[in-house]
Each structure stands twice: as structure tokens, then as C-alpha cells.
């Protein structure tokens, strides 16, 4: 059996702690996020800068309502750290009747779809683009047990949400560990005391490390596909890049026209982002922010791409990057990257081993993603049960 229902007018009292803004005084401003995500502190404002003739002070445990967006869950209970903030007359405030309402009970109520739906219903048909009027807000009815039961429900909700938060923190830690593992795996596969060579020594004889088109111009329909840093992805590159450039622009950069299979690396902005050009990119050209690398016979292409994307190389690239308007790495610096160079057969064995592990890591990430969705669904489920007297 559910709880009895009461109108908010029985448990909330309108409050008006208004004052005229004073020039030279800084006012802490309060805002209310959508969909039950709570109140927050905005940037302070000088009394001389506000457009409002009156500002209204909040107190801890006040219920604050955004007139415009209450229908989208913009209602909150003011926390202790927001005590003393100010809002405009667009944010009516109400004090809880403490003999009847536990503020934390209403805090959790504001996070439910059922409550948002009631706010939406009371906002409809009003003037001013569906603003909710304070008197209409107070007409909303909610399930309300006696105070001891409210407090028991709050304790139960907060005990369960603490567990959800712990699970979410653990989920985040696992993702970070997998990210670290992905970047450090190569080191564990390399033999100790391995010889290194400069990247510039490992380029195909007929080639050189080159960046692409300086001024690509506007997007041209049916033009030449144009590869930018955002297109680079070692595992899932797009079939074709989105942007296309004029053939006459492409003709000026024949040296960086792709044949497919080249290693590409970001050298402006997203420094060190690595990809391998799929064969579907044959005939495309590259941006100034991308360098083209054609490996020579001493190094396996996939091995070299993995080394360049691994932590030691990425650390070197970050350390040598110049920061102008945006981070930039020049070809000479890139050429100095030290590449550990075991025999070709060993390189290929390393690539095979890493690819096997990456498949397993990807499967774990997918599982973690599913877990994240399940965690996100737990809070609405907990609240639904709580306010139906099922907790």
C-alpha cells in the first residue's frame, strides 16, 4: 500500500528574503540544474551589474524552483554550502515545515520522473512560456509518510546510493587501469637492452616524413578526400574522411597524397594521435596537422604504429612539443623519436601478442560500459521503490 498524499502547500511555506542590490557588493548567485541534478553556485555578480531590482537570499534546506524549467526537473533543496546565495524573482523559494517534512526526503523526491511530470502538468497553460507560478507549484501532491518513516526512507536511499557511488568509483578505476595498461603493454613485450634507432632512419628510401596541405580551403563536393587529425584511429578509422578539398589544391601537395597503408600522426593540436591509412583512403590528401610516415624494410608497419602510440614515444612527443597558438611538433623533432628495434620476426610476434590482448581489453571495456548503463539505471529504480513504500 502506498503513502497518503499531501499538497506541497501543507509542507512548504513561501519565503521572501529580498533586498535591493547594492553597487560594490558581490552577491553569490544560485542556479538549479535540470532533471533533478541539484542547485549549484554560479559566478558572483556585483550589485551594480544585475538587471534585477530585487535579489532573494537562500537558506539551507529551502526548496528553490526555476519558474521556466521546473517542468524539466529544475527544482532543488538548497544544501549547506549554498546557504546565503541569491536568486532573482525567477527562482521562488519555500521553507519546509519541519514538523511535517524532512528536507532530505524532498531532496530525493525532486529526482524522480513522477515529480518532474507533476511540475510539467502544473506549468502547462500558464502565461510566459509555461513558467510555473508559485501557487501552482504548491498545488502539486506528493506521497508523504510520518517524519520517522521519511527519515528511515532517506537513510535507506542514502545507504543504497552510497553503494552505487562506490561501484561507480570502482568502475572508473577499472577503466583508468585499462587505459594505463593499453599504453604500457608494449614495454612488457620488448626484450631488455634492445637497440633503438631514430624514426628518421626507419623511413622508406624513396620517402620522407611530410606534413600536408597548409590552406585546404572550403569543403568541395566531389572533391579529393581530406584527412584531418580527428579522422585518425588505429582500430576503427572511418571508411572515408568527411572533408573534401578542391583538386587544384590537392595537386600542389602530391608528395602527401596517400596510397593506403601509411602511418599518420598528429603534429598540431592533438599531438601524437596515430592512425594507419586504410586502403579506402587511397588518393586522399592530409592536413598540415598530420604527418605521413612510410616505414622502410627494417621495421614492421604495425609494430612502428604501436611504438609511436605507446607511452615512451608519447611522453617524448609531449616533452618536445612547442606551444604557440596551439601545440605544434615539427618534423625534425618527430624524426628524432627513438624506436626500439628487435628483429622483424620479433616485431611481428609482439604485434600479434598485443593485438590479442587488445581484443581482450576491448571486450572488458564493453562489459564495463554495460555495467555503467546498469549503474545509471539503479538510482531511478531505488527512488521509484522508495516512494512506493517498497524499500
Image: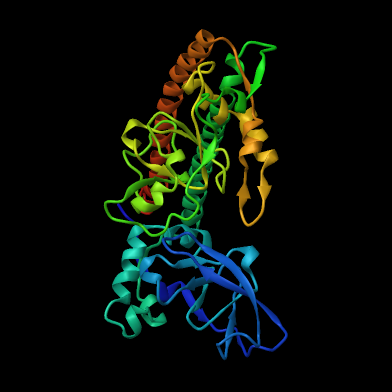
Q: Tell me which residue sits at (32%, 85%) in the image.
A: 127
Q: Tell me which residue sits at (37%, 79%) in the image.
A: 131
180 or 269, nearer to the observer:
269
Q: How many marks?
A: 0
301 or 216, nearer to the observer:
216
Q: Position of residue 130 (x, y in %)?
A: 33, 78
Q: Position of residue 381 (x, y in %)?
A: 37, 46
Q: Height in image: 23 above or below 10? A: below
Q: Height in image: 170 above or below 124? A: above
Name the side, left or right, on which 374 lies relative to 333: left
Name the side, left or right, on which 252 lies relative to 173: left
Name the side, left or right, on which 97 lies relative to 314: left
Residue that protrudes farthest toward the right in the picture = 24
Choose top left, top right, bottom left or bottom right for residue 126.
Answer: bottom left
Task: Tell me if residue 323 can be seen.
Answer: yes
74 or 248, nearer to the observer:
248
Q: Tell me which residue sits at (36%, 32%) in the image.
A: 278
Q: Height in image: 372 above or below 36? A: above
Q: Quadrant of the C terminus?
A: top left
Task: Tell me if residue 4 can be seen.
Answer: no
Q: Tell me which residue sits at (65%, 40%) in the image.
A: 318
Choose top left, top right, bottom left or bottom right for residue 286.
Answer: top left
Q: Position of residue 212 (x, y in %)?
A: 49, 45
Name the side, left or right, on which 241 lies relative to 170: left
Amino acid at each position: 500500500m502506498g503513502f497518503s498524499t499531501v499538497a506541497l502547500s501543507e509542507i512548504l511555506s513561501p519565503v521572501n528574503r529580498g533586498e535591493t542590490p547594492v553597487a560594490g557588493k558581490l552577491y553569490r548567485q544560485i542556479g538549479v540544474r535540470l532533471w533533478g541534478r541539484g542547485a549549484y553556485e554560479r559566478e558572483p555578480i556585483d550589485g551594480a551589474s544585475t538587471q534585477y531590482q530585487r535579489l532573494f537570499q537562500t537558506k539551507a534546506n529551502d526548496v528553490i524552483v526555476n519558474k521556466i524549467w521546473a517542468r524539466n526537473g529544475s527544482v532543488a533543496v538548497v544544501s549547506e554550502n549554498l546557504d546565503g546565495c541569491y536568486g532573482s524573482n525567477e527562482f521562488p523559494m519555500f521553507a519546509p515545515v519541519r514538523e511535517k517534512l524532512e528536507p532530505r526526503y524532498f531532496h530525493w523526491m525532486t529526482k524522480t520522473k513522477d515529480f518532474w511530470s507533476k511540475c510539467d502538468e502544473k506549468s502547462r497553460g500558464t502565461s510566459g512560456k509555461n513558467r510555473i507560478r508559485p501557487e501552482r507549484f504548491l498545488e502539486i501532491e506528493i506521497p508523504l509518510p510520518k517524519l520517522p518513516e521519511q527519515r528511515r526512507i532517506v537513510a535507506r536511499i542514502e545507504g543504497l546510493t552510497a553503494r552505487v557511488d562506490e561501484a561507480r568509483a570502482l568502475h572508473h578505476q577499472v577503466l583508468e587501469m585499462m587505459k594505463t595498461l593499453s599504453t604500457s603493454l608494449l614495454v612488457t613485450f620488448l626484450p631488455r637492452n634492445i637497440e633503438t634507432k631514430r624514426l628518421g632512419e626507419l623511413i622508406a628510401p624513396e620517402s620522407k616524413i611530410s606534413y600536408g596541405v597548409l590552406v585546404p580551403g572550403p569543403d568541395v563536393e566531389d572533391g579529393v578526400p581530406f584527412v584531418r587529425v580527428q579522422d585518425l584511429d588505429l582500430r576503427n578509422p572511418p571508411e572515408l574522411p568527411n572533408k573534401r578539398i578542391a583538386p587544384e589544391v590537392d595537386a600542389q601537395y602530391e608528395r602527401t597524397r596517400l596510397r593506403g597503408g601509411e602511418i599518420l600522426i598528429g603534429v598540431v593540436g592533438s599531438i601524437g594521435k596515430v592512425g594507419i591509412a586504410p586502403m579506402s583512403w587511397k588518393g586522399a590528401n592530409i592536413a598540415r596537422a598530420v604527418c605521413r610516415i612510410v616505414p622502410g624494410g627494417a621495421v614492421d608497419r604495425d609494430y612502428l604504429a604501436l611504438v609511436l602510440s605507446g607511452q615512451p614515444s608519447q611522453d617524448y612527443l609531449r616533452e618536445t612539443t612547442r606551444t604557440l597558438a596551439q601545440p605544434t611538433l615539427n618534423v625534425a623533432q618527430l624524426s628524432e623519436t627513438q624506436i626500439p628495434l628487435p628483429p622483424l620476426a620479433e616485431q611481428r610476434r609482439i604485434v600479434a601478442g598485443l593485438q590479442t590482448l587488445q581484443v581482450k581489453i576491448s571486450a572488458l571495456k564493453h562489459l564495463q560500459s554495460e555495467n555503467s548503463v546498469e549503474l545509471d539505471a539503479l538510482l531511478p529504480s531505488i527512488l521509484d521503490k522508495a516512494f512506493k513504500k517498497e524499500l
